[in-house]
Amino acid sequence: MFNMKPIAQTFLVFQPNTGIEGVFLSKIDIFFKAVSSTYGISLQIRTVENGFPTSNIVAGGQAYLPATLTVASDDSTIATTFNFYTMPFLQTNTQYAIVLIPDGGNDQYLVWTAQLGDTDVSTNAPIYTNNQLGNLFISSNDLVFTPVITESMKYNLYVADFFKGNTSISSATANVVYKILPTDFIKMTDTVSTFQVGEAVYASNSKITGVATYSNNLVTVPNSTVSDFAVNNFIYVSKLDRSQFNLVRVTAAPNSTTITVSGNISFTNATCVAGKVQGNGALYGVCQSIVSTFAADQPQLVLDSTLANTSLNFAGLKGQFLFGSSSGASANIYSIHDKAYDSITPSLNYIVPTQTNTSVTFAGYSNTLVQDSPNGLLANLPYEFVDQERLLLSRSNALANGSIGANDSLTVAVSLTTSNNLTAPYVDAIGTSVTITRNILPSNTQLSGCYITLSNTNGSFVTNELVTQAGAVAVVAASNSSYLVLNTITGTFAANTTTIVGGTSSANATVSGVTPFNENLGNGYYAASRYICKNVILAEGQDAEDLLLYMSAYRPPGANFNVYGKFLHGSDSDAFSKKSWSQLVESPLTYALFSSPVNRSDVVELQYDLPLSVTVDVSGGITTNTTITVADTSKYSNGSFIYLADNTNNKFNVRQINGISNSTTMSLSTNTTISSTNVTVGYIPTIQTQTDAFLYDRNNNISRYVNSSDIVFDTFKTFAVKVVPVSNNGITVPIMNNIRCVALQV
């Protein structure tokens, strides 16, 4: 027997002719002659190299016992058992080492060994042979091990028997089911300060003004509301501007307008806001992260470990305060958000020995809240949906739905099968995760719009509602009390004119500022993915008159590409970076070509060119700087771009139609530089700004643009291209494989 510092015993997992790759070690018996009354002891299973123990511990191969759970035996018949929390997998016909390490390197533990030539203390039989499958080793530093070839440690190894008691079964299956953690995704507006990761976040259920704080823990409230602040109620107290926020508990109500609270209020102020807390503090979640979304959408507060239940949850609390218990940060709840996703990747850390198998399935909910039948997945590979998006529901929304379990909006099941009682597949639960991915693609309507700053806001605008201002109409894409993001716009929104009004919410506000955005201006909000090539400068004397773009792409129905070019003439003094992006139009030869919706190898060849202007009226008459008369205004539409050509005086303008007054008169967005009674008028399709390029139909279809000073340039020397994928949803994803540009001389 040996006093231990580290002591090791190598062994061989011997399984001849079974065909299995390995076994799972469930526990080990060690036989001690003496144990410590104070210090515990660790057992490790390590790999062996060249017959010697290494420092590498087998996954799951660690166990620890305190001194109180170790047992000494005078005749080596009583074992101390080390159980493994996670059974280590040991390959057959491979050597491993049992390593015993007493706490602090103490020498109070004695382990029973068998020595050649000695007598077995339990049977009195002589010992003629030692352990043929391994050797005993000692060490003073756990780095260098010295073999003791005449002795062997006494131990028992136990391996898992997966069919014990069911020997007639030829195969067995077990299922492991993973569900999402209790998580709420909350969109916020009007955030003050910053929530801290790890803090508890609560929600209010009332808002009472006219509150004052005095003398640290004394709060005065209106006489009519003192009953809302009963003893032991959790309340919040905040400055009117929410610059300071406290969560406290009511400890007493001395009179009809006074309450005392636990702890000291961190500020003294006579114009405060106070209110009760949802569920009297029973509803909260722990701040996991704050997700800043793309574009102008509301930021999201991710709460894990949420205590939402069927009767008390965050659903339906729009407009209520959220506040952090430690940071004092606060925000208004905009919505309880569900996460849309378009693909799923199960990440499994697993072992699948021979004679075993695993299979993975998932079930989720569609964006119409229809539950999937289980779908098969391949571990560690993405599974992309081709039918519709799925939703990962906030716990509160799932509970509010009533027909969906709190954590059931996404489940992943792993089936484990074996046909041999000594082996089985293994999945590491700690190392298992699921990654969901959403394809963020804008629709065409989202590529252009305007960002509107507000003041004097009354009520709350609602996403997707129609808003109007003096005949202009648009759809709300995002909002809070200080801004609106609008798209699908008809007409023109203007600052400091008339009030903007919500059609569903009836909210209203003063428009303080209007900033248009689109891909032509290069300030689009919603395109999360863009391809932009390097600037191309043509060789001297090779100025181009047109540009053709060819693209090999996967384009399923419902998806497309918006293609743009930027152009600069050699004599134009404007900076190339300031030039607008001119939208190219797809050739009639390819616009009907679409790929298979389920086969992403189905590539089509697409072609794009500059838009061609169309002469509408050979002559018209300018009556004022912003008004033009034509033969028939029905040929035109409000918001479209037209050119005005005065060939006699060699003048050319591009302008946007701002309104159609009657059958012969239209107003223009800006003054013209032309004053003539004989102007040619043409329509320019697809362009979004006055400086976009196009092919001029009355000049051999040569490219033309007008710069910010109304100077006309035909041909270009420098160009770049931009491709923006668009789709009606995240399932239908266009993929560009390659792109070729040809600068032409007509």
Image (cartoon, rainbow, N blue to C red):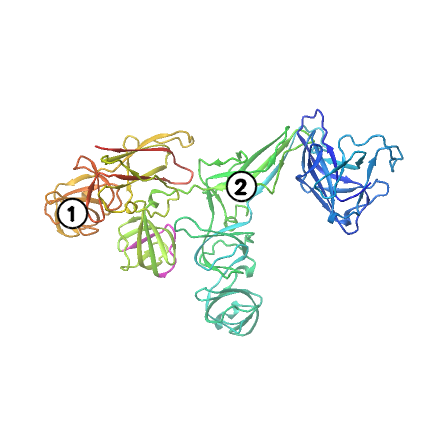
Name the outermost residue toward the right.
124
Give the left or right position of residue 110, taking residue 94 as reference. Answer: right
Check disc 1: other Cα within 10 Å, few if <14, some if 14-19, many if 20+. Answer: few
Q: To which quarter of the image does residue 97 belong?
A: top right
The answer to whether residue 201 is above or below residue 546 is: below
Seen from the viewer's position, the closer of residues 215 and 237 is 215
Give the magenta part as a residue range. Answer: 456-469
Give the left or right position of residue 579, taking residue 320 as reference. Answer: left
- Whether residue 160 is visible to the viewer of this picture, yes or no, is no
**Contact, mark 1 vs mark 2 (Cβ under 8 Å):** no
Which of the marked residues, 1 or 2, is nearer the chain's N terminus? 2
The answer to whether residue 568 is above or below residue 50 is: below
Q: In terms of secondary structure, where does tag 1 sit?
A: loop
Give the left or right position of residue 293, taking residue 7 as reference. Answer: left
> What residue type is disc 1 on?
Ser
- Picture coordinates of residue 364 (x, y %)? 51, 40
- Give the Cα separation between the discs numbered 1 and 2: 62 Å
- Picture coordinates of residue 20 (x, y %)? 67, 28
Q: What residue sits right under mark 2 in the picture?
A: 434
- Picture coordinates of residue 190 (x, y %)? 42, 58
Q: To which quarter of the image does residue 570 belong?
A: top left
Name the outermost residue toward the bottom.
255
- Whether residue 501 is visible to the viewer of this picture, yes or no, is yes
Seen from the viewer's position, the closer of residues 351 and 555 is 351
- Picture coordinates of residue 672 (x, y %)? 17, 50
Q: In terms of secondary structure, where does tag 2 sit?
A: strand
